Image: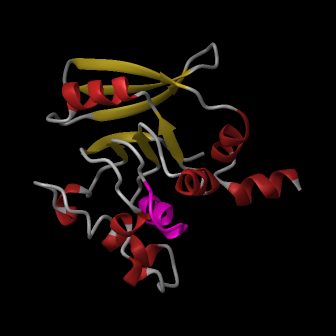
Amino acid sequence: MKQFGGQVLFLDRSDINTDEIIPAKYLTENTKQALQPYLLEDLKLEGFNPKTDVLGKKVIITRENFGCGSSREHAPWALEVNGIYCVIAVNFARIFRQNMYNCGLLALDMSKKDIDDMFRTFADKDTECKIEQKEDGTWKVKLIAGSLSKSYPFKLEGFEKALVENEGWIGYADKKY
């Protein structure tokens, strides 16, 4: 199973669309790996530089409606080839969210209150994220910055959990069919 968690990239904006995640001009690339250098290339966000800010990040924390716009698998693929296996937001565009799980990636819906707290508490710090399953089967996002640490519960169950455990739709289908 993929390793979820790592250094966090905070993107303090709602409605980041699939064209900003991976520009349409790169959709003719023949491999997922060819998308790697272009992740978030067209994202306009004050103080954000995709050439330097994405490197080494493993988790994105953002606001509402992440992945809106055109429906395309290339957006989660571009995240995946950059080692970003988890995006945490208030909510996601429906098709984008499903494409994330189809690739075996986490698209974690968290309450606006929790997302606001994450930004208020951690966005200006070098923050690490850990995704943990507790013994009782519940899940949590744990954010750590120096001696500061906070946890936020979330649910992962059913078909989405099965997709993540099997590294996506193809792994799931191979196992089940």
Magenta stretch, residue numbers: 67-80
What residue is drawn where x is 63% and y is 45%? 164
What residue is drawn where x is 20% and y is 18%? 147
Magenta segment includes 72: yes
What residue is drawn where x is 37% and y is 45%? 59
To which quarter of the image does residue 82 belong? Answer: bottom left
To which quarter of the image does residue 83 belong? Answer: bottom left
Query: For this rendering, which residue is in front, 74 or 70?
Result: 70
What residue is drawn where x is 86% and y is 51%? 176
Q: Residue furthest left?
A: 47
**Is 42 located above or below residue 165 in the figure?**
below
Query: For this rendering, which residue is in front, 37 or 13?
Result: 13
| Location of the N terminus (image quadrant) | top right
Colour scheme of the picture: secondary structure
Query: For this rendering, which residue is in front, 24 or 134?
Result: 24
**Is 120 located above or below residue 102 in the figure?**
above
